Amino acid sequence: MSVIDEVSRRRFLRQAPAAGVVLGAAAAMGQESTETAAVMSDTIRIGALNVGAYSHLAAKWGTLINARPENGEIPYTGMRITHCWDIDPARARGFAKGYGCTAVSEFDGMLGKVDAVISGGYYNYAHNHLLHEPYLEAGLPNLVNRPFANSVGKARRLIELAQRHKASLLVPSALGHNDVVSQARQFVEASDVVGYHAAVGAEDYPTHGIHGLYMLCRAVADAGNPIQSVSFRARQWYAAPSLLTYEHHDESGRPFFGTLHSGDFGIGALHIHTEKENHGRGFALTTGTGVPYDKTEFWAPAIWAFELMVRTGKMPQTYDQILQKNRAFMAGWRSVLVEDGRPVKLEDVPSDWDAPVELPNMPGDPTFALFKKRFG
C-alpha cells in the first residue's frame, strides 16, 4: 500500500480539536483571517513531529514548552507537548522520556489527542506534504519548521490544504520573529527603500542560509515589496560563503535590489538604504544575554507567535506570503544548481522540480535514508 493510500485510508480517524480549544477560521488564499477565536485559558496540547535529527524541538523548543523543573527550567508558553512522533522510533521514545510525553508509532497517531501540531526537523522537508496532511485536514493549526517543502508543488499542496480546511499555518524562523526584525519592518513600511545588504551566520543554504531569506521576507517583502527574482552565487551550496541577490518591486512597481551574505557573520544583520537616508540604518540581531533573555530574545518569539496564532486564529503571514517565501527559496536553488548563479524569476521555477534534501556536509546521518525507505 502506498503512503498516499495509507493516509487516505486513515482519514476516517480525523476528529475535531478538543472542546476546550476554539480555532479561528483561516481566510482565502492570500488574505489573513479577520475572525478571532475565543481566548483560551486551557493549556494547548501539542503534537510534536520530527523530534530527533536536526530538530529545533530537541535543540530548543522542547525545553521552552515542556520545562523540566528538576533541571532548573521554567515554562515559557501556555502549551504542553503531550505526544510525539519521529521517523526513528528510538528517538521518539527518547524525546518522550526526556520531556514527559507519549510517543506514537504512526505519524498520524496524534489525531484527536492534540490541539495543534509543531514539526521541528530538517530531513522531513521533502515529505511534509504527507506528514501534515492528516492534521491540516482536521483543521488543526500547524507549525512547519523551515525549509517547509523542497518543491513549489509540494508547498502549494500544503497551503491549499490548509486553506481548504481552515487550518492556520506558520512557517517560521527565529530570524523572522523578534523585536529587531519588527523594528526593521516598521522602518521599511515608512520609507522608500532603494536597497539593502544583509548577513546571516550559515553553513549551508537549506538549513541555515534560509534563515536570512525568512528574515528578509518578514522585514522587506511582506511590507509591500515582493521578491521577483533570486540570484545565488557560491562555490558550494552546502558551505559558506555565499551571496544571494534579491530583486524586489515596491507597491508602485519600482524595482530595488538587496544582497544576503551567508557565512561567519554572527547571528544576522540587515542594513537598509532609503531615499532619505542614503547612508542607511542598521538592524543587528542578538541571542540575548543571561537568563531569561537568552530564551526570550531569540528562541521563544517564534513559539509565542504560534501560540498566539492558535489562540486567535490570526496568521502572522498570509497563505500567499508563505507560498511566495517558498518560491523565493526554490528560485535560489534553481539559480545555483541550474543557472550558474544567474537570476531566476520566481514564476520560472517548475512546480515539480525538487531541491536536494541530503546534506553533503553531514555524511552518514541515517535520517534521510529512513524517510526515503518509509515514504519513497
Image (tube, grey):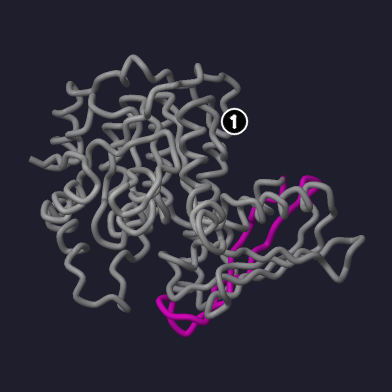
| Part of the protein shown in magenta | 224-253
- Left or right: 72, with 104 as reference point: right
Label the magenta part by its dominant secondary structure.
Answer: strand
Which residue is drawn at the image coordinates 20% and 45% (left, top)? 85
Q: Looking at the rendering, in which quadrant would you find the C terminus? A: bottom left
Q: Looking at the rendering, in which quadrant would you find the N terminus? A: top left
Could you say which is closer to the camera, residue 119 or residue 100?
100
Residue located farthest toward the bottom when viewing the structure as drawn: 235
Could you say which is closer to the camera, residue 95 or residue 158?
95
In the rendered image of this protein, does residue 253 appear above or below residue 12?
A: below
- Answer whether residue 212 is visible to the viewer in this image: no
Give the secondary structure at mark 1: loop
Which residue is drawn at the image coordinates 56% and 60% (left, top)? 213
Residue 36: percent from the left, percent from the top?
Answer: 55, 20
Q: Answer whether residue 242 is magenta in the image.
A: yes
Residue 25: percent from the left, percent from the top?
Answer: 48, 21
In the rendered image of this protein, does residue 271 appear above or below residue 243?
A: above
* Residue at the spot of label 1: 31
Which residue is drawn at the image coordinates 53% and 56% (left, top)? 298
Residue 242: percent from the left, percent from the top?
Answer: 53, 78
Q: Amino acid at mark 1?
A: Gln
- Left or right: 17, with 199 as reference point: left
Residue located farthest toward the left when viewing the structure as drawn: 1
Give the crowd class for mark 1: few <14, some 14-19, many >=20 residues within 10 Å. some
Which image quadrant for residue 196? bottom right
In the rendered image of this protein, does residue 169 appear above or below residue 277?
A: above
Residue 56: percent from the left, percent from the top?
Answer: 36, 56
Which residue is drawn at the image coordinates 26% and 32% (left, top)? 134
